[in-house]
Amino acid sequence: MSKQVWFKVENPKEIRFKRITPAVFDIAINAFLKKLPSQMDQRAKTILHTLKRKDNDMVKAIFSLGAIEEKEFKTYQLREGNLVLAAMTRRILSQEYVNAKGMERVVDDDDFRKAIDMKNLSERVSNFGFYMRETWKLKNREIRAIIEKLDLSGIKRIVMPGAMGGSAIGGLVVKMLLSNLGFQSDLDLLPHYPSPMRPLRKGDLALIYSYSGNTEEALLWMEKLNTKDVKIIGVSTGGRLEEICSEQKLPFIRIPGKKFNLVQPREHLAVAIVILLAIVGYAGMAWREERGKRLIFDIEKWWSEIERSTQKLTELARKKYNVGMPFSQSPAKQAALFLNWGATNPAKVERLFPMKDPAFWASPFYEAIARRLENQFGECVEHPASAKIMPEDMHNEQEAYVQQWFETLWGGNRNGEGKIVSPNTVFLRFKGYLDKRLTIRADKLFNDFLKGAPQMRFEIKNYGKEYPMLGELEALLFCDLTRAFSSIYRGVTPHYVHSMNYNKFYMATVPGGPGIKGGI
């Protein structure tokens, strides 16, 4: 095979994926598989050794392709072509590994986990509570000082313009946590490009929040803001956003991602929660009515109770939400298997492809939890999933799911061989202590109309006044560990976003962008 550059960039707008063709990929993979030992344990051992290789080494060994270099773009390492090939190779080899060992052994195979999750994102998930406590220690005084220096008179709301994905989910979660404590919050998200149809207005405190500091949407909002009408705070790990804040002498909060060795924006949710709680609290943008008086959410008074909840969360992580828990005792591993293939018994899983299509059902009280898992499946598991918010999506989609299930029950849904085909949808329902009447309605849907359909339930508990927010934080911990194992079980390295990187790099070459030189 000839060595080719992944990007064709005579014209910087022309960025194409042309490493090798699918046909050549198939030939090379099959040739490699034919060389593997036939004895199953030895075959598994050889596959595992290959899975542990670095991406460029794997691509060179199987496809005879060297590392990619693009001298035209020194600030951006164009190595994604090899990463994509390595990613597809890992999925094929993971299927062969399951064939050799059986999924019942793979679910608790720590060597396999480490081979797929090379940067150990799954191990760090259980640090959620620790990250919250440490972020408070690191950033509390700094955030308070920044807010105290701002003239907050006339500030009516906090807005996160252009924040999305891992940079936006913290805002959704903080709104949920405060709301479930009875506090209203003036915190809005505008997850889109700047538009005159949804402008910022006088009296807004704009949080330009981007984990990398290079998110195009957030930076374009930054360019449009009038600092006379809108107060601005930049929040990132650095990037172009930090440069702009420094140039314009605007307040800037550095996300302590490197402090915790975080690899991706999606890892920093615990950090984001604390930063945003502190900003909202010190700015006085959350309150509730008590005995006819407005009671402001005082973050410093509440922190001792929140910290106690994070300590309890750490205890829960140690007891059941960690990578070392065996499948039989791990809610996250069991959920991962179910959401991927609709199975509760690992021995029933023989093929990694295709997967089921998960639907995560929750009430508006817990929407942020369902959205978190939806986002994580898209980015980490690299498979479509959807969040369904009750009762609105009951009105919109209940009939479709029920009739689809009835077609299965009564044999209307058959393949060309006459065999009944089960629907591809699997359901995970988040049932919470605040749902009350909705619980009755949801029970009727899932226990009657959809009885027998592939479904699982996660109970969001009320741990009482002693542990505020704990039930919701536990659900988020469950979600993050579930998505870690969902990706690992199907052989997907959970820390790459290949096409997103390509698209962001491409947009950086389009005139009218915010001036970044590529990357995310």
Image: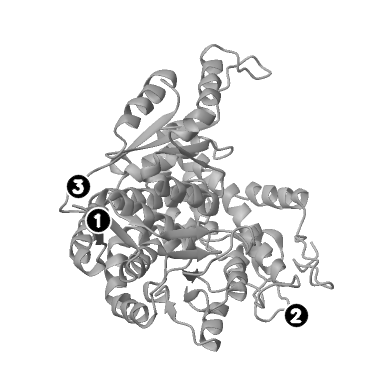
Badge 2 marks a residue whose secondary structure is loop
| Camera-side residue of 379 and 188 | 188
Looking at the image, the residue that sits furthest to the front is: 292
Residue indicated by mark 3: 463
Q: What's the CA distance linking mark 1 and mark 3?
A: 11 Å
The residue under the point 30% across, 49% down is: 180
In the rendered view of the protein, which quadrant contains the N terminus? bottom right
Residue kind at label 3, given as amino acid type? Tyr
Residue kind at label 2, given as amino acid type? Glu
First of labels 1, 2 by sequence position: 2
**How is the structure coloured here?**
one colour
Label for residue 182? Answer: none
Residue kind at label 1, given as amino acid type? Leu
The residue under the point 27% across, 51% down is: 182
Badge 1 marks a residue whose secondary structure is helix
Closer to the camera: disc 1 or disc 3? 3
First of labels 1, 3 by sequence position: 1
- Left or right, 196 with reference to 52: right
Residue indicated by mark 1: 313
Label for residue 72? Answer: 2
Task: Look at the picture and state if 311 lies above or below 220.
Answer: above
Q: Position of residue 215 (x, y in %)?
A: 58, 69
Q: Position of residue 91 (x, y in %)?
A: 58, 49
User: Crowding at label 3, few (<14), some or many (≥20) Cα neighbours within 10 Å?
Assistant: some
The residue under the point 42% across, 72% down is: 257
Q: What's the CA distance linking mark 1 and mark 2?
A: 48 Å
